[in-house]
Image (tube, rainbow, N blue to C red):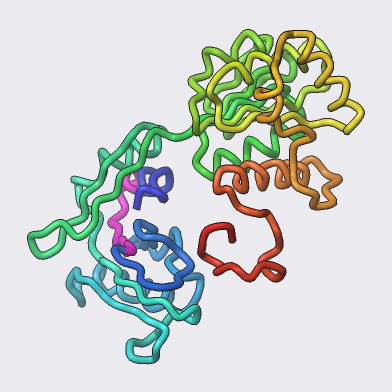
Amino acid sequence: MLDLAHDLVAWVESGRRIAVATLVDVQGSAPRTVGSSLAVADDGAVLGSLSGGCVDGAVHDRCRELLDGTADPGVEAYDGDGGLAPGLTCGGRVQVLVQLLGPDAVEPLRRAAAGLEARLELRHAGRVVHVEHRPAAPRMLLAGATEEAAALCTIASAAGYRVTVVDPRPVFATKERFPGAAEVVCAWPQEHVADAGLDERGVAVLLAHDERVDAPFLAAALALPIGFVGAMGSRRTHSRRVDALRELGVDDAALERLHSPVGLRLGATTPFDTAVSVYAEVVASRSSATGRPLRDDTAPVHGAGA
């Protein structure tokens, strides 16, 4: 349920009554993981998904019945073996808890929406059937208030990152250009990176086109235990960048951590497609995945390395 925190908090504040269906058990292959939710408001609005298919339709109807008072809260099972209908075409089996959103869930949802650590217990029939814990949101620092940064900010914030954009140019470093950012800081990126709260889950990406920022920012970022450090640019730029970093004392072990030129080869030409390419590499690196097309990979679709 915490995956829908932002929108659910907005619904709560608007006074809507809400039914939520949450995956509390997954066996075998399924499109979503435990904790994923689908929510339905009393005006018919829908958030989230549990399967992207027929299960969502059945669960939506179940939520509407609960809101209408014609059904009770409960746990429903759906599988792909034909024994329980509707089923999952990928062959898995899931259990879904359907209940009204209660007041005990509001504070955890508010914390999750704010990017803070949150813990939510889901109870049914007097027992806890699922505990959802979400650590504080991982942080992403984007150096350079460029169009690529604006697109990457949109993608990353929607994916759950707390994004900070930093650029020394006040005309570009504005909240209006980066509405999805938690912070927009007008400063030299290399002077801000140590104060950005980045840890081993953090991401720092250089998107500026300024040699005054390039090597100093990357050297400062690589000196910290940041999970992913990337830099956009051509291979010629990368070569100059490595030379400049070596002059600043960055060693080979640190240079091995640098994703430069950053991004997967998607044929991107627009700022948004470039941002997709960059974020795709962040996800692949975080998951230790191959980044290959699923069609050309024999590993399970929902397994490691897929």
Magenta stretch encompasses residue 233? no
Q: Read off the magenta span.
A: 12-23
- Name the residue at 23% across, 63% down: 99
- The structure residue drawn at horizontal position 48% and vertical position 20%, both measured from the top left corner, is 197
In the displayed structure, would residue 57 be above or below residue 272? below
Residue 2 visible in the snapshot: yes
**Is 97 placed left or right of 171 in the picture?**
left
Q: Quadrant of residue 66?
A: bottom left
> Which residue extends farthest bottom?
82
**Percent coordinates x, y for residue 305 in the rendering:** 58, 57
Q: What is the residue that sits farthest to the front in this orientation?
A: 252
Q: Residue 297 at x, y = what percent?
A: 67, 67
Residue 81, placed above or below residue 48: below
Image vertical order of residue 65 relative to residue 157, above or below: below
Front residue of 138/70: it is: 138
Location of residue 284 with respect to 55 vertically, above or below: above
- The quadrant the C terminus occupies is bottom right
Query: Which quadrant of the view contains residue 238?
Result: top right
- The image shows residue 88 at horizontal and vertical percentages of 44, 79
Q: In which quarter of the image is residue 93?
A: bottom left
Is residue 14 inside the magenta stretch? yes
The residue at the far right in this view is 236
For the point 53% across and 30% down, which residue is it?
Answer: 202
In x, y percent, where is residue 164? 58, 25
Pick whichever, 306 or 65, lies toward us.
Answer: 306
Q: Residue at x 26, y 66 (%)?
A: 97
Tell me if 196 is positioned left or right of 70 in this view: right
Q: Can residue 181 be seen in this view?
A: no
